[in-house]
């Protein structure tokens, strides 16, 4: 029996009719950084509760080494509503006590920023309570941290900070981390190994999320499992991990050759040009044009702050002043400016992702795009053929349908749809989104949160919109269901606009990403990492008031006249005040590494073609001609050697490109 700092020994546990674990033996030791994945309801949170001691197994036992301190972040906090933030998170310590230590000061300034320490827990929002509970945990010393969905309610910058904090919290051989999260980027960044919880067992995998996907595909392939659809989704996601834009600029978690062999027959994630053609035929040339748009949320005098602005606008009062020949009057609006003179052209087939801190105005921007909110200044031109659909964070649209079964709801729609060139029924679409045919008689109100989210997306797609706006679409979905949703969106031929704090999802389903910064929209040519670098001061924050999204070109900034989207140096513009020469040398090294990587990729493609030709030549050769076969085999081995050398060069260069 292996000895763990904390572990399960032959643990079995059942709830009602569901078997959660069956004779599970697994544990955690110092230095472990483990991510837990699996379907909703399969036991991920239960596993953490077993380790934390808040759940008792039916059989077996949970062992813990003497003196080990275990900290647990539950999905739902147990904070005292009557306590103040200072009492709950800081153990009632005064500022001079916690601010004197760099680590505790950073935690408080990051997680409790904007929250009064004298506020009562009962007066806080759900997101604020989550931050207080996380701060409470991180401000204490623990040997093992158990985190259940730690990224919930956190914006992208805070998620990035949390990942960095956890990586630096202990030395590599000290401390241990066990986390459940659907944020796949977080898993890849923080975790060194993965546990998959499924079918009452716990399967361990070496490496982060990317390596887990590779091993999972290989496991499924070797075992010849019958879960064909689940396996194909995993392979498609692995294809994106290997071929996607982000994979070219970040360190690979698995060997290129092994990954390429597994995905050799997987088609591209989506045919962008074909989807744009289809979108144009459905939408026409104009979708949504934001022209010189400014929006201010009006505030009362007592609510104004130093950041509030005043703006004089002309208001048309013709409806209320019918006898007045001069109905237009001037009015001064004072409040928070969330959009500042923005021009953004959104075209057919564009797939745009939007990032920004909480309160930056992302939801306001979406409301202006779909016409439900009129801007303070400027105009919004919406194409005549546009049909919007909005996947909101809330599930209010399903409430009126609560008493009906899924089958009754689906009967209101057409009997068949053409999707990806094939005739598809609503039932088949339902199954593609992870529902089983046996669930047709389930009532909408009885579905879980994740099932309701998928049903919400299904009904939206059945309405056949041509512009889809998604606000945090990953809420309530596990990693498998996120992959299912992404697969559905891959073949959706319309304009897609997504707001999300999930870096992986955002770059997976969109082709271009933008940041909403100080009321301006800025293109992120290097993906979400550019946004992180901007906020950390590694890239200059040049306001971008004009962004032209159509046909993949980006317009000029009125402030400085520079081209936003075509300046490849933006992603490398590191303004380090400490050592400008070193920063410049690093930027040059990164660019050179990426150029060489691109060249190697072209060479590998040619060698792959040559390899296929040699294999075909060998298959067609006279089997009795041993000398000829030996010559062909020698050439094949030399080719394999060249490919291996180039792959190793690519991996070495990827280290430089990332660093």
Image (cartoon, rainbow, N blue to C red):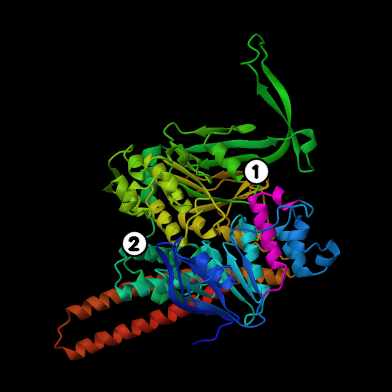
Circle 2 sits on which residue?
A: 267
The answer to whether residue 456 of the structure is visible from this angle is no
- Residue 473 rendering spot, x and y as whole percentages: 50, 50
Disc nearer the start of the sequence (1/2): 2
* Residue 491 % position (x, y): 37, 51
Decide: is 60 above or below 372.
below
Q: Is residue 490 visible?
A: yes
Secondary structure mainly formed by the magenta segment: helix
Inspect the magenta stretch and tell me whether residue 387 lies in it.
no
> Callout 1: 10 Å neighbours few (<14), some, many (20+)?
few
Q: Considering only vertical position in the picture, is 202 above or below 485? A: below
Residue at the extreme right: 96
The part of the chain drawn in magenta is 120-142
137 within the magenta span: yes
517 over 310 or under it: above or below? below
SS category of the residue bearing label 1: loop
Name the residue at 35% across, 82% down. 640
Q: In this view, does 194 lie to the left or right of 259?
A: right
- The residue under label 1 is 558
- SS type, badge 2: loop
Q: Which residue is drawn at 80% across and 66% down?
A: 98
> CA–CA distance between discs 1 and 2?
41 Å
Q: Of residues 322 and 108, which is closer to you in this image?
A: 108
Q: Which residue is drawn at 72% across and 70% down?
A: 140
| Quarter of the figure with residue 501 | bottom right
Closer to the camera, 537 or 209?
A: 209
Circle nearer the viewer, 1 or 2: 2
Expressed as whole percent of the image width and height from the top left, the position of residue 307 reads 76, 43
Q: Which of 182 and 592 is in front in this view?
A: 182
Work out whether residue 24 or residue 235 is closer to the camera in this orientation and state it: 24
| Residue 164 at x, y percent in the picture | 64, 68
């Amino acid at each position: 029996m292996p000895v763990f700092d904390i572990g399960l020994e032959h643990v079995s546990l059942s709830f009602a009719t569901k078997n959660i674990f069956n004779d599970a033996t697994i544990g955690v030791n110092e230095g472990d950084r483990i991510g837990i994945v699996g379907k909703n309801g399969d036991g991920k949170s239960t596993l953490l509760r077993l380790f934390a001691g808040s759940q008792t197994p039916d059989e077996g036992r949970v062992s813990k080494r003497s003196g080990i301190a275990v900290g647990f972040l539950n999905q739902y906090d147990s904070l005292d509503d009557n306590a103040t933030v200072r009492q709950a998170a800081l153990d009632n310590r005064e500022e001079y006590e916690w601010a004197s230590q760099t680590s505790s000061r950073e935690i408080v300034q990051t997680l409790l920023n904007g929250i009064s320490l004298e506020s009562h827990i009962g007066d806080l929002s759900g997101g604020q309570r989550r931050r207080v509970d996380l701060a409470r945990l991180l401000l204490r010393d623990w040997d093992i941290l158990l985190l259940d969905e730690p990224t919930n309610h956190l914006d992208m910058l805070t998620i990035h900070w949390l990942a960095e904090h956890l990586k630096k919290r202990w030395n590599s051989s000290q401390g241990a981390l066990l986390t459940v999260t659907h944020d796949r980027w977080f898993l890849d960044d923080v975790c060194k190994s993965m546990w998959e919880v499924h079918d009452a067992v716990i399967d361990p995998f070496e490496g982060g999320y990317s390596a887990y996907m590779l091993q999972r595909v290989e496991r499924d392939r070797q075992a010849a499992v019958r879960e064909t659809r689940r396996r194909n989704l995993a392979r498609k996601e692995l294809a994106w991990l290997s071929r996607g834009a982000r994979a070219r600029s970040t360190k690979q978690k698995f060997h290129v050759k092994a990954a390429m062999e597994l995905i050799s027959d997987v088609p591209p994630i989506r045919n962008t040009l074909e989807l744009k053609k289809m979108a144009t035929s459905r939408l026409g040339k104009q979708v949504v044009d934001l022209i010189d748009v400014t929006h201010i949320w009006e505030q009362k005098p007592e609510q104004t702050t130093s950041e509030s602005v005043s703006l004089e606008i002309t208001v048309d009062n013709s409806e209320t002043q019918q006898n007045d020949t001069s109905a237009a009057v001037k009015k001064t609006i004072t409040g928070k400016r969330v959009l500042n003179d923005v021009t953004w052209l959104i075209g057919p087939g564009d797939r745009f992702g939007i990032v920004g801190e909480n309160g930056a105005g992302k939801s306001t921007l979406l409301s202006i795009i779909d016409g439900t909110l009129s801007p303070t200044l400027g105009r919004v031109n919406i194409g005549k053929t546009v049909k919007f659909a909005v996947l909101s964070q809330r599930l209010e649209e399903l409430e009126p349908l609560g008493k009906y079964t899924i089958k009754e709801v689906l009967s209101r729609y057409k009997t068949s749809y053409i999707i990806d060139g094939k005739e598809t029924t609503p039932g088949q679409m339902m199954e593609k989104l992870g529902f089983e045919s046996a669930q047709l008689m389930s009532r909408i109100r009885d579905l879980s949160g994740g099932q309701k989210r998928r049903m919400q997306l299904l009904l939206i797609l059945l309405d056949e919109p041509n512009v889809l706006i998604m606000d945090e679409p990953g809420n309530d979905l596990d990693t498998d269901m996120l992959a299912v949703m992404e697969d559905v969106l891959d073949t959706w031929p319309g304009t897609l606009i997504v707001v999300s704090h999930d870096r992986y999802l955002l770059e997976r389903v969109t082709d271009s990403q933008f940041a909403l910064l100080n009321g301006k929209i800025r293109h992120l040519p290097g993906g979400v990492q550019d946004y992180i670098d901007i906020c950390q001061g590694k890239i200059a924050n040049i306001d971008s008031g004009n962004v032209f999204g159509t046909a993949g070109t980006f317009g000029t900034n009125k402030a400085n006249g520079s081209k936003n989207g075509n300046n490849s140096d933006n992603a490398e513009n590191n303004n380090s005040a400490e050592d400008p020469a070193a920063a410049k040398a690093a930027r040059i090294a990164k660019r050179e590494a990426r150029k060489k990587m691109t060249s190697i990729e072209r060479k590998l493609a040619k060698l792959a073609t040559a390899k296929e030709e040699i294999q075909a030549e060998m298959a067609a050769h006279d089997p009795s001609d041993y000398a000829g076969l030996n010559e062909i085999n020698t050439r094949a081995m030399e080719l394999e050697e060249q490919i291996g050398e180039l792959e190793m060069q690519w991996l070495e260069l990827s280290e430089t490109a990332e660093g």
